[in-house]
Amino acid sequence: MTRRRKARPFFAHETALVESDEVGEGTRIWAFAHVLEGARIGRNCNVGDHCFVEGGVVVGDHCTIKNGIALYDGLTIGCGVFLGPNAVFTNVRNPRVSERERQPFLPTRIGDGATVGANATIVCGVTIGEHAFVGAGAVVTRDVPPFALVFGVPARRRGWLCPCGEKIRLGRACVCGRRFRRAKGSGIEPAPGSR
């Protein structure tokens, strides 16, 4: 007599290994991906081929995690985030083999609606703000403000992007109708009354 496996609310490719019970409805996990027990993945996400998700990772709803990405403990990903192929996340700033010199994992946060381009490296301990855009191949070593466009090695702010993907010009409405203004510090924020 064969045991029937409990129906899951998500799809996992036959070669994927999903140990977590906290994967949301409608999520798709593709070939050779490995999701460890304790990882939390939201609804309607897409986890690509050869991805690895450690047990302390939290992924929001409607995220796309492209092929070849490893997500480590301490990483929190908001809703609607896009991670390009082979993006790299670290969890220890100065890794050492010696047990005596092990450091605690540094938390890293990716805000709602953010994009991380292919082959970008995100050094642990940073926060990428909501709707920020990290260009392909960038190396992010410090926090990225919301709506910022960053690229280069190390990544530097090169402009501002609207959630619709168009370049923001302060004082003018975006093609989608949103308006932005300067915020406290060096960032920007949606203008009052902007949709």
Image (spheres, rainbow, N blue to C red):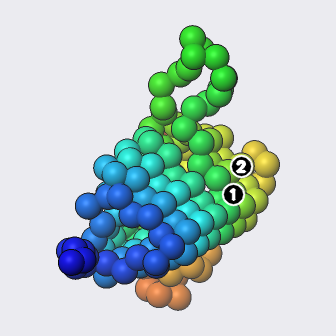
Mark 2 lies on a secondary structure that is strand
Furthest residue toward front: 1
| Residue denoted by label 1 | 120
- The residue at the point 64 percent across, 17 percent down is 98
Amino acid found under the numbered disc labelled 2: Val
Furthest residue toward top: 100
Is 11 drawn above or below residue 190 in the view shown?
A: below
- Tell me which label, 1 or 2, sits earlier in the chain: 1
- The residue at the point 57 percent across, 32 percent down is 92
Label ID, residue 139: 2
Residue 139 location, x and y as percent? 71, 49
Is 126 drawn above or below residue 48 in the view shown?
A: above
Q: Specify the quadrant that holds the C terminus.
A: bottom left
Residue 68 location, x and y as percent? 63, 64
In the image, 167: left or right of 36?
A: right
| Residue 175 appears in the rendering | yes
Is 131 drawn above or below residue 2 in the view shown?
A: above
Amino acid found under the numbered disc labelled 1: Ala
| Residue 127 appears in the rendering | no
- The residue at the point 54 percent across, 75 percent down is 31
Quadrant housing residue 160: bottom right
Discs 1, 2 touching: Cβ within 8 Å: yes
